[in-house]
């Protein structure tokens, strides 16, 4: 983990370049043919979707296999971006309001 404001900004920019919002969901399904192996056994799949939940609705965006790795990296980049954002926000809060006072039990 890099330290210092400059390091954070660089990491944030790097993450922002690739980040994608949502979570990857694997879908397995039956094709409907009664003679197919999926009717009784293993279903087809996985087929991948990027699931985006906002304002009470879930939007599923199909992810072609050739883009799965990029989407997976993008989702990880977004998580990193969010974690970095929390760290920067915590540091900014200390700058604005001063250091967090310690609880009495720790004194
Ligand atoms: Zn089938």
Image (spheres, grey):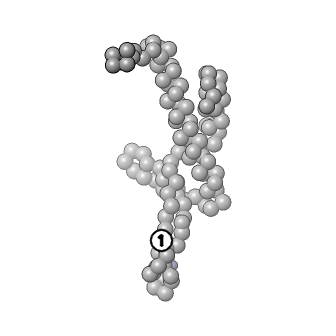
Q: Which residue is mark 1?
A: 29
What residue is rendered at 54% in x and 60% in y? 48
What residue is rendered at 40% in x and 50% in y? 57
Q: Can the viewer see residue 35? A: yes
Q: Nearer the viewer, residue 70 or 59?
A: 70
What residue is rendered at 50% in x and 50% in y? 23
31 over 53 or under it: above or below: below
Q: Position of residue 107 (x, y in %)?
A: 37, 15
Q: Position of residue 82 (x, y in %)?
A: 52, 35
Q: Can the viewer see residue 9? A: no
Q: How many circles with numbers are drawn on the protein?
A: 1
| Circle 1 crowding by C-alpha within 10 Å: few under 14, some 14–19, many from 20 | few
Q: Position of residue 8 (x, y in %)?
A: 61, 27
Residue sitting at the far bottom: 35
Please tell me whether mark 1 sits on a helix, a strand or a loop.
strand
What residue is rendered at 59% in x and 42% in y? 77
Q: Is mark 1 within 8 Å of ligand 1?
A: no
Instruction: Tell me the quarter of the picture where residue 16 sits.
Output: top right
- Along the horizontal axis of the image, is 30 left or right of 11? left
105 over 24 or under it: above or below: above
- Check the picture and name the quadrant holding the N terminus: top right
């Amino acid at each position: 983990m890099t330290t210092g404001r400059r390091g954070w900004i660089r990491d944030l920019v790097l993450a922002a370049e690739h980040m994608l919002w949502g979570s990857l969901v694997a879908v397995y399904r039956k094709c409907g043919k009664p003679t197919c192996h999926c009717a009784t056994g293993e279903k087809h799949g996985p087929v991948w979707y990027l699931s985006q939940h906002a304002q009470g609705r879930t939007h599923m965006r199909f992810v072609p296999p050739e883009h799965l790795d990029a989407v997976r990296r993008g989702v990880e980049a977004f998580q990193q971006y969010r974690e970095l954002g929390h760290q920067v926000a915590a540091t900014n809060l200390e700058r604005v309001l001063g250091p967090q006072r310690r609880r009495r039990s720790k004194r």
